[in-house]
Image (tube, rainbow, N blue to C red):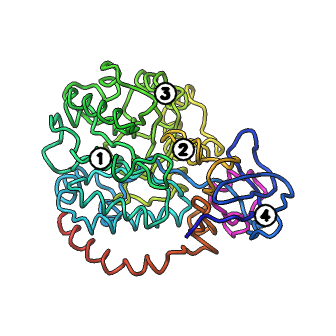
Amino acid sequence: MTADTFLISGGRILSMDPEIGELDGDVLVENGAITAVGHDLHAPGVRVVDAGSSWVLPGFVDTHRHCWQGAVRFSGVGWDVAAYMERVHGRVAPAISPQEAYLGDKLSAFACLNAGITTVCDESHVQHSPTHTEALIRALTESGIRARFGFGWSAGSTNMLGSTDPHPAHLSEVRTRLLHDDSALVSMYAMLRGPVLSSLDTCVADIARARALGLRMSFHVGHPNPVGRSEISLLHDAGVLGPDMHFIHGGECPDEELAMMADAGVGLSVSATVESWMPGIGIPATARAVRAGVAVSFSADTELAAGGDMFTVMRSAFTADQLRRIADPDYRDRHAQLTSAQLLEFATIGGADVCGIADRVGSLTPGKRADIILIDRTAPNLASFADDATAIVTAAHAGNVQTVFVDGVERKTAGVLTDAAELARLQPGLREAAERLRGLL
Ligand SMILES: [Zn+2]
């Protein structure tokens, strides 16, 4: 499919661009780029997409999802993080085949598109071989989603806790041969282990290697470790923090470490649902990060443990924060209550900002690529005269997402994925993969 030219007409536009704001109007897309947002736009001869009963907003940006775990989706709901690490990292990850990884990634990508997530950062720590890597990239490419491919390590090998093994050797080749274009629909960054899963010296060397290749980096932070300090302090003291990084979780990290992130321009990915459902990761740090001045984004993390749509993540962040406010008056006094406008911002432009692509997506701004979703505002669960963002954050679900464009290409139409037949074709393989992999858990 090629990028299209069309006019989205008569919608309630939530642009997420502070200069454009919210308006009843039109969005003109030409060759996959947004070229105008305003009232009564005219574009003779182009296809018109009627948005009269819709909210029109930028697609959601998920800054952290282990897409390969789509193959074992919902197998570990309610587990604590120790069980997850032992069973998933220790047993399933090392055994996954390239084809199983391909199937999991593709299913996750389709689930994202169905729920209006137009960009996903695929935190992919099953880089066991170049064949695995190519299968994972192929799945993302075929799905049509905008993907940031986080080239991670080879989970389950000896590189756990203090490892001195360097990041997998084919990182450089993948960068130079497959994913050298940072503006491509599938682009690349390095998902690094950080100075707990690997030794500090190894981590610093991995960071230097990623930077030499022009790669941004992500790190999971807050792993329990013998020195009792998190990855953030260790990286800060090593002098390597920078705005080309984003951190994931951080719920157990003290405010001083959040301040280190803010000072260095490091954004945060809060996986509010999985953090709430999987004991041991830490309590969602959304409001604490806001207070510290850290750029916040949202992520689904793993569909092994929870559903993966952004509506659920936004509501989980609000629920977790409200519970904390109820339980702790000091916390309530020190942190402003999260608003629907903020939650929607973290799920869209916040995500684009944190993963370094806000120049291309995250808001309906002329010049950006046309990653746009239409949500049915007349649906029984949504029709209201309340604030738009509040209605969406409070009650919308994936089934309300009627239309999805990625890079100007329609990926969901009238509530159905355009690749629904391909998804059906994958089912027998997915069933086989799930049965084999679940047997290892
Ligand atoms: Zn994760």
Q: Quadrant of residue 371?
A: bottom right
Q: Of label 2 and label 3, which has the lower sequence position?
A: 3
Outermost residue toward the left in this view = 158
Answer with left or right where residue 100 lies relative to residue 57: left
Q: Are marks 2 and 3 in contact (CB under 8 Å)?
A: no
Answer with left or right where residue 380 lies relative to residue 193: right
Q: Indicate the amino acid at tag 2.
A: Ala
Between 253 and 28, the one nearer to me in the picture? 28
Residue named by callout 1: 152
Residue named by callout 3: 265
Q: Of label 3 and label 1, which has the lower sequence position?
A: 1
Residue named by callout 2: 352
The span from disc 2 to disc 1 (Cα, nearest Å) is 20 Å
The span from disc 3 to disc 1 (Cα, nearest Å) is 22 Å
Q: Of label 2 and label 1, which has the lower sequence position?
A: 1
Which region is colored magenta?
A: 373-395
